[in-house]
Image (cartoon, helix red, strand yellow):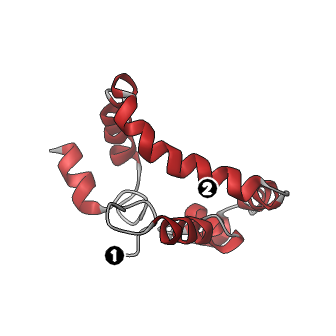
């Protein structure tokens, strides 16, 4: 497995997907979503990722978030009109995210901007 929590998960067992996402939503995982690819992570104010971690840490919220992430995978099959908007959003994200941002892998970004 490539290890990216948002990548293709078609052959990964459901419980393993939950664990990968759980790690991404841990305090360290949330912090990395704010700071990865930033030349000087010290310029990122900790309030954003600290508040995110506090909200997810509330009783039951982690499971709610995991259920939503996994449900989104199923919704891709049932919401084609919403999916029609996603390529436009991805292109905007690809243009605005720096090359070092792991949220959008470089191969995918190049494909979107081609």
Q: Which mark is residue 53?
A: none
Disc nearest the viewer among 2 and 1? 2
Q: In the rendered image, which residue does mark 1 sit on?
A: 2
In the rendered image, residue 54, in percent from the top left (x then y), is placed at 82, 59
Q: Is residue 41 visible?
A: yes
Question: Crowdedness of circle 1 by 10 Å Cα count: few (<14), some, many (20+)?
Answer: few
Q: Earlier in the sequence, mark 2 or mark 1?
A: 1
Check the image and name the residue furthest to the right. 59
In the rendered image, residue 35, in percent from the top left (x then y), is placed at 58, 67
Based on the displayed image, in which of its 4 quarters is residue 81 positioned?
A: top left
The reply to whether the C-beta atoms of the residues labelled 2 and 1 are less than 8 Å apart is: no
Q: What is the distance, in whole Å, between disc 2 and disc 1 at their CAs?
A: 20 Å
Left or right? Give the position of 77 relative to 103: left
Left or right? Give the position of 58 relative to 108: right
Q: Nearer the viewer, residue 11 or 65?
A: 11
In the rendered image, residue 8, in percent from the top left (x then y), is placed at 33, 60
Check the image and name the residue furthest to the left. 114
Left or right? Give the position of 94 relative to 74: left
Q: Which residue is painted at 43% across and 43% down in the image?
A: 74
Q: Nearer the viewer, residue 27 or 98?
A: 27
Q: Nearer the viewer, residue 68 or 52?
A: 68
Label 2: state its secondary structure: helix
Q: In the rendered image, which residue does mark 2 sit on?
A: 66
Question: Crowdedness of circle 2 by 10 Å Cα count: few (<14), some, many (20+)?
Answer: some
Task: Tell me the quadrant of the picture where the N terminus can be found.
Answer: bottom left
Task: Tell me the quadrant of the picture where the C terminus can be found.
Answer: top left
In the rendered image, residue 65, in percent from the top left (x then y), is placed at 65, 52
Based on the displayed image, in which of its 4 quarters is residue 10 positioned?
A: bottom left
Q: Which residue is painted at 53% across and 69% down in the image?
A: 15
């Amino acid at each position: 497995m490539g290890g990216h929590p948002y990548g293709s998960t078609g052959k990964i067992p459901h419980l393993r997907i939950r664990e990968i996402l759980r790690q991404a939503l841990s305090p360290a995982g949330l912090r990395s979503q704010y700071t990865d690819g930033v030349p000087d992570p010290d310029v990122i104010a900790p309030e954003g990722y600290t508040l995110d971690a506090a909200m997810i840490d509330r009783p039951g919220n982690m499971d709610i978030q995991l259920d939503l992430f996994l449900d989104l995978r199923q919704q891709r099959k049932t919401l084609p009109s919403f999916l029609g908007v996603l390529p436009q959003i991805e292109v905007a994200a690809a243009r605005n995210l720096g090359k070092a941002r792991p949220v959008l892998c470089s191969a995918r970004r190049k494909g979107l901007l081609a």
